[in-house]
Image (spheres, rainbow, N blue to C red):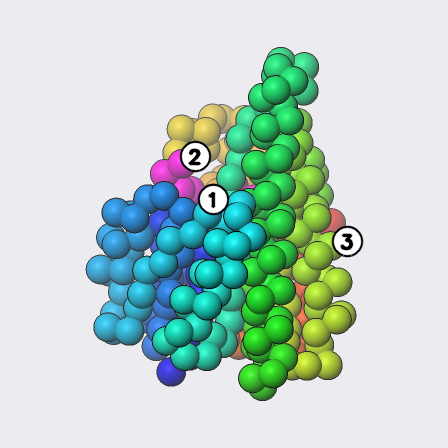
Amino acid sequence: MTHILVTGASGGIGSAICRILAARGVSVTLHYQSDRAAAEQTRRTLPGEAHRILQADLSDPAAIERLWSAAGAAGRIDAVVNNAGIFPNHPPLSTEYADWTAAWQRTLAINLLGPAHLSYCAARAMSTEGGGRIINVSSRGAFRGEPAAPAYAASKAGLNAMSQSLAKALASQGVYVFVVAPGWVSTRRVAQAIEDPAVLADQPLRRVATPEEVAEVVTFCALDAPASMTGAILDVNGASYLRS
């Protein structure tokens, strides 16, 4: 049975990823940072019995190492989905310096360094176990910027670069790295924001993506994408931001 570790499984996108993976017969390890109840709720919706829940603070490198060891205790991990992330607002002209520096430090620790450290653990193991896959969830903000949350945009741009560096470094070992970059997604966290007419006016589909749409792309990368796609960044933003 395929075993996949999903970080941020207590959130809307993470929960959808777990559900779609489990529907494909995958054994899922659900990571959460603080909301165990939400992770438990997601696990109850998954078909099968081989799913586990693990807690870790992804801003702590030692906790990431422990997470990897605990997840691997149930057997080989075939893929890792680095989905967990935070989005604190800190507009530069209205944020106090202490809050500004705290936002940068926390955002980079969780959104960039956390995936980097977990990807390191995965790469070292997968390269000796016949290969595997790493899927990093980025954002269109990496390309278009986020004026009220510049640390978020910077962290996702860094995540893209890190992912492509790892794709080059690990391809010969059968470890493939993919990036999924959503725009707005209809999760509970942003429910109020996506009702803003200005947000919808920016969407050619006249709606934002669903968590399930993002999860389908993540699942494709984890289970079906050909090896030659390693290093690819896949946009899931409904043509709201196009790049070439």
Question: Disc 3 and disc 2: Cα gap in Å?
Answer: 28 Å
Task: Tell me which amino acid carries mark 3.
Answer: Ser
Residue 29: in sight, yes or no? Answer: yes
Q: How many marks?
A: 3
Q: Earlier in the sequence, mark 3 or mark 2?
A: 2
Relative placement, left or right, of 78 versus 154 is: left
Find residue 244 and name its label: 3
Residue at 46% across, 79% down: 76
Find residue 190 and name its label: 2
Contact, mark 3 vs mark 1 (Cβ under 8 Å): no
Q: Earlier in the sequence, mark 3 or mark 1?
A: 1
Percent across and percent down for residue 171 are: 71, 77
Task: Tell me which amino acid carries mark 1.
Answer: Val
Percent across and percent down for residue 115 are: 58, 55
Quarter of the image for residue 120 reads bottom right
Q: Residues within 10 Å of mark 1 (few under 14, many from 20)?
A: many
Residue 226: in sight, yes or no? Answer: no
Q: Residues within 10 Å of mark 3 (few under 14, many from 20)?
A: few
Q: 227 and 239: which one is in front?
A: 227
Relative placement, left or right, of 240 versus 6 is: right
Secondary structure state at the residue bearing disc 3: loop
Q: Report if residue 188 lies within the magenta region.
A: yes
Contact, mark 2 vs mark 1 (Cβ under 8 Å): yes
Q: Label 1 belongs to which residue?
A: 185
Q: 51 and 209: which one is in front?
A: 51
Magenta-tinted stretch: 182-190
Question: Disc 2 and disc 1: Cα gap in Å?
Answer: 8 Å
Find residue 168 and name its label: none
Q: Is residue 210 above or below residue 141?
A: below
Say which of marks 3 and 2 sits in front.
Answer: 2
Residue at 61% across, 20% down: 98
